Image: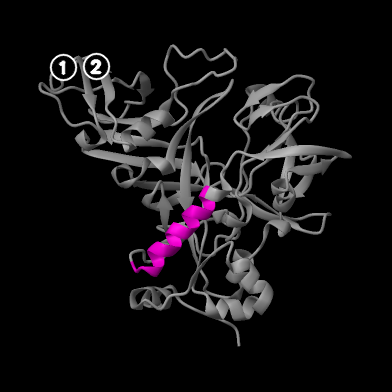
């Protein structure tokens, strides 16, 4: 008999203390031992996790009204500019924003860039942050300038809002050019001297629900050490599965837009980072529970690193030219082994996301659910399971 469960039934088991929860790593050997059907009957929830750099992140704030009142037109937090084209004392700070005097073109060993992601981390860590704002002045908002120091607890609202997180399956980056290049995928040596990747494989949230059968608008998640929610498909949301000649299937690039109360988050799960020769960003801890409603959901939730492929892309020539055609495909098991074989060469690999931290997130989320403090939420709408991202074309390209 086919396994069919409802979210209400699973939540009732959470409330009663009878829920069975495994991490996405733990469920793999269970399915190998008992099969998909039996595992789906026994397990109620599979938890996932990822801890990696997510550039399309940021936070919005309400600073509170000054005396006299002020309509802030430009705002800086620790000398990093936030966008203030909102209401009078609201602003949005992007994770990749850097100070105006940042040496954008400098590349030297030990270079460190402080940016928006670092400001967000400092606020979550309850550190003091300088606030400077200027305004043009109006009859209702006459004040023109303020300089002060704030902490996150001084703010009326501090909300993490990330337009694109939890990238479903990202590129493996190599460099076929004859010079070292500096990218958001780290430093890439010439002539395919190394390969960097940034997905946690068998623990990665969107690889465990590739068709978005359970993840949708309103899904409750682990975000930055607190509770957050999926609010929309992320920018560049482009999911789908493609059969490969290698015998597996390539999961594409679905993404999520997520939100959560920054005041409830923890600094170890929101960490500002700096990439040599590239800029600043934010490393985000994110985990999603997958309710096992049927056998199909269990099948995908139990796929292992040996069965999940990632595309290898040249960042030296093809990617910057806007033509990132894959050079080949490799499994996450191969990536995590430390080397991949590409075009007849052994290439050393390195992760930009942390698998141990992803494992820790999945375990924390598992504990929250088992302890009854984290119920699963029914999506108010599901996200597209097939989508295409449209490139930006110049006028000349449009007219061609």
Ranked by sequence position, the earlier of labels 2 and 1 is 2
321 or 140, which lies in front? 321
Picture quadrant of residue 269: top left
**Which residue is depicted at the point 39% across and 53% down?**
229
Q: Residues within 10 Å of mark 2 (few under 14, many from 20)?
A: some
**Which residue is depicted at the point 38% across and 73% down?**
14
Q: Which mark is residue 343?
A: none
Percent of width and height locating residue 271:
44, 36
Q: Is residue 230 visible?
A: no
Circle 2 residue: 135
Picture quadrant of residue 393: top right
91 or 355, which lies in front? 355
Circle 1 residue: 143
Classify mark 1: helix, strand or loop: loop
Q: Is 210 located above or below residue 45 in the figure?
A: above
Q: Is 398 located above or below residue 229 in the figure?
A: above
Main SS category, magenta section = helix
Picture quadrant of residue 397: top right
**Which residue is depicted at the point 32% across and 42% down?**
262
Does the magenta portion include 363? yes
Which portion, as a residue range, is magenta? 357-372
Percent of width and height locating residue 150:
23, 28
Q: Are marks 2 and 1 in contact (CB under 8 Å)?
A: yes
**Which residue is depicted at the point 38% across and 21% down?**
80
Which quadrant does the N terminus fall into?
Answer: bottom right
Find the distance from the CA under tag 2 to the CA under tag 1: 7 Å
Q: Is residue 400 left or right of residue 52?
A: right
Classify mark 2: helix, strand or loop: loop
Q: Residue furthest right?
A: 344
Percent of width and height locating residue 37:
62, 79
Percent of width and height locating residue 55:
51, 35
């Amino acid at each position: 008999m086919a396994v069919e469960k409802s979210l209400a039934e699973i939540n009732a088991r959470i409330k009663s203390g009878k829920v069975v929860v495994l991490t996405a790593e733990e469920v793999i050997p269970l399915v190998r031992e008992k099969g998909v059907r039996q595992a789906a009957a026994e397990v109620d929830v599979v938890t996932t996790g990822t801890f990696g750099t997510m550039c399309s992140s940021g936070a919005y704030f309400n600073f509170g009204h000054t005396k006299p009142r002020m309509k802030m037109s430009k705002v800086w937090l620790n000398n990093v500019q936030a966008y203030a084209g909102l209401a009078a004392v609201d602003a949005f700070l992007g994770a990749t924003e850097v100070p105006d005097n940042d040496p954008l073109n400098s590349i030297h060993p030990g270079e460190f860039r402080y940016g928006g992601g670092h400001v967000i981390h400092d606020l979550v860590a309850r550190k003091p942050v300088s606030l400077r704002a200027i305004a043009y002045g109006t009859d209702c908002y006459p004040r023109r300038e303020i300089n002060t120091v704030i902490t996150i607890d001084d703010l009326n609202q501090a909300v993490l809002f990330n337009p694109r997180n939890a990238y479903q399956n990202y590129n493996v980056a190599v460099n076929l050019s004859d010079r070292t290049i500096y990218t958001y995928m780290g430093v890439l040596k010439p002539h395919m001297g190394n390969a960097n990747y940034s997905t946690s494989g068998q623990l990665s949230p969107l690889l465990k629900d590739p068709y978005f059968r359970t993840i949708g608008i309103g899904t409750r998640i682990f975000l930055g050490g607190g509770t957050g929610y999926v609010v929309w498909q992320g920018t560049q949301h482009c999911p789908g599965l493609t059969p490969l000649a290698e015998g597996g299937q390539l999961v594409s690039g679905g993404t999520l837009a997520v939100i959560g109360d920054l005041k409830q988050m923890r600094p170890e799960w929101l960490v500002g980072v700096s990439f040599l020769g590239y800029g600043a960003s934010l490393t985000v801890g994110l985990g999603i529970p997958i309710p096992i409603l049927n056998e199909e959901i269990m099948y995908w939730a139990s796929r292992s690193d040996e069965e999940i492929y990632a595309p290898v892309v040249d960042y030296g020539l093809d990617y910057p030219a806007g033509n990132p055609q894959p050079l080949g495909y490799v499994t996450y098991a191969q990536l995590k082994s430390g080397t991949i074989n590409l075009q007849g060469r052994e290439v050393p690999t390195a992760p930009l996301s942390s698998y141990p931290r992803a494992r820790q997130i999945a375990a924390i989320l598992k504990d929250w659910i088992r302890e009854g403090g984290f119920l699963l939420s029914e999506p108010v709408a599901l996200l597209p399971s097939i989508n295409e991202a449209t490139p930006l074309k110049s006028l000349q390209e449009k007219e061609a």
